[in-house]
Image (cartoon, grey):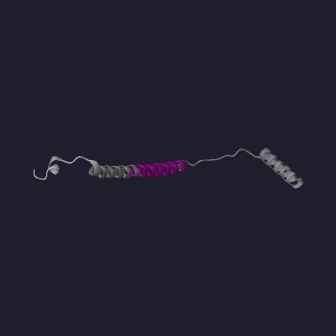
Amino acid sequence: MFSTLKLLKKLLVVVLLASLTSKTAEAYIDPGTTGLLSQVLYVLFYAALGVFLYCIQYIKRYVVSIKQVVSRMFGRRKKNEDSPNS
C-alpha cells in the first residue's frame, strides 16, 4: 500500500512538473495536406455511396423476384389461360 502511494506521489510530481514547464505548441499545416485530405474524403464518401446504392439495387431485385414468385403462386390468371378451348 505504501509503495502504491509513493508511486502515485512520484507520478503526480512528474505530471505537475511537465505541465508547468511545457510551452505552447507551434504547428504548421501545409496547404497541400488539406487537398490530400479532401481527396481521400471524397473517395471514401463516393465509395460508401456506391456500396449503399448497390445494396439498394440488390434489395430491389430480391423484392421483385419474391413478388414474381408470390404472384405466380397466388395471382390471377389471364382469360386465355383459364379456358384452354379459347
Question: Please, which residue is most extreme toward the bottom here?
Answer: 3
The residue drawn where x is 45% and y is 50% is 48
**Quadrant of residue 24 in the image?**
top right
The residue drawn where x is 21% and y is 48% is 77
Question: Please, which residue is most extreme toward the left here?
Answer: 86
Residue 44 included in the magenta stretch of the image: yes
In this rendered view, identify the residue nearer to me: 40 or 22. Answer: 40
In this rendered view, identify the residue nearer to me: 40 or 85. Answer: 85
- Residue 40 percent location from the top left of the image: 49, 52
Query: How many numbered circles does the render carry?
Result: 0
The residue drawn where x is 89% and y is 53% is 2
Residue 23 included in the magenta stretch of the image: no
Main secondary-structure element of the magenta-colored stretch: helix
Question: Please, which residue is most extreme toward the right here?
Answer: 2
In this rendered view, identify the residue nearer to me: 65 or 23. Answer: 65
Relative to residue 66, is residue 76 drawn left or right? left
**Chain part drawn in magenta:** 33-54
In this rendered view, identify the residue nearer to me: 37 or 55. Answer: 55
Relative to residue 42, is residue 65 drawn left or right? left
- Residue 36 percent location from the top left of the image: 51, 51
